[in-house]
Amino acid sequence: MTIAIIGVGLIGGSIGLAVKNSKLKIENIIGIGRNIDRLKLAKKLGAVDEVTTDIKNGVKNADIIFICLPVRLIADTVIKIIPFCKKGAIITDVGSVKAPIVEEVEKFLSQSRYPAIPLSHNSAPVFIGGHPIAGSEKTSVKYASNKLFKNAVVVLTSTKKSNKKALNIIKGIWKAMKAKVEIISAERHDEISSLTSHLPHVLAFSLINIIDDFRFTGGGLKDTTRIASSDPGIWADIIFNNRSNVIKAVKKYVNELSKIENAKSKKELYDIFKKAKVKRDKVW
């Protein structure tokens, strides 16, 4: 199996290291990107076996292609590379927003000369939406790890047009990287992520922005706002592309804050905080 990784940063590099550390039979891993120095670092670290800045040449022999780029670039990149992929190639991604990407790619496939037909030796390339819920505020390949996805949840999206064989192949690759795979709709993924991932980033950015004196801070603020050190460009992209769900999440949060604002007794506050503690303790 030959794997191509477009965008060899933290996630892309960790995919390369993890599949090498798995029991998958990998013949070659090709790192594709625009910055040759970053690609050379990825090769030096063992995340990929060869590198290229020529995306068309890089994907032509790949059986599996992981697109590890900012959300705004994923659908366009899929559409760009499809004519140059080998027959039967499977393209997947790691984007934190799924519905807009899946919708755009499937629309292209249904309207182009590359229809989403059942996977076979003579089939056109197909696309499976994916999102590994793993990573950190760091983005460079130098932070990549072959254990990043161990016990992490990876969401794969399924639609009426999804190729089931390709879906199972991608599922198998992620499971070989020790991840826990969940298959749900792209719309449901985005709804859940707006609360569990996107809103926390919005809150961390907002909390830091309202503080103007950091002399009396401790571990609590540091832990709560760690993700405010995330790449602002990446997160502006994510939030914008899932904005309808994020707006709903913000409104839910404001409603919860209003309960604290309007509490008339210590007992009311205690009940609010106790409910949260019990819920969190059940998860972690």
Image: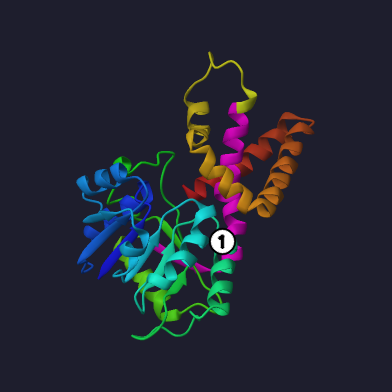
Residue 172 x, y percent position in the rendering:
34, 70
Above or below, comparing residue 227 to residue 78 in the picture:
above
Residue drawn at the location 62% of the way across and 53% of the way down? 242
**Quick one: SS at disc 1?**
helix
Q: Residue furthest top?
A: 215
Amino acid on which disc 1 is placed:
His
Q: Does 112 appear above or below 102?
A: below
Residue at 23% in and 67% down: 24
Residue at the spot 59% in from the left edge and 68% down from the top edge: 103
Rendering coords of residue 151 (x, y %) = 36, 56
For the N terminus, the quadrant is bottom left
Left or right: 21, with 198 as reference point: left
Residue named by callout 1? 189
Q: Nearer the viewer, residue 71 or 262?
A: 71
Colouring chosen for the image of the structure? rainbow
Q: Is residue 201 magenta?
A: yes
Report whether 172 appears left or right of 111: left
Observer-nearest residue: 265 or 144? 144
Q: What secondary structure prevails in the magenta region?
A: helix
Q: Is residue 26 magenta?
A: no
Q: Residue at x 46, y 65 (%)?
A: 80
Magenta-colored span = 180-208
Which is nearer the eye, 9 or 80? 80
Residue 190: % across, % down = 59, 58
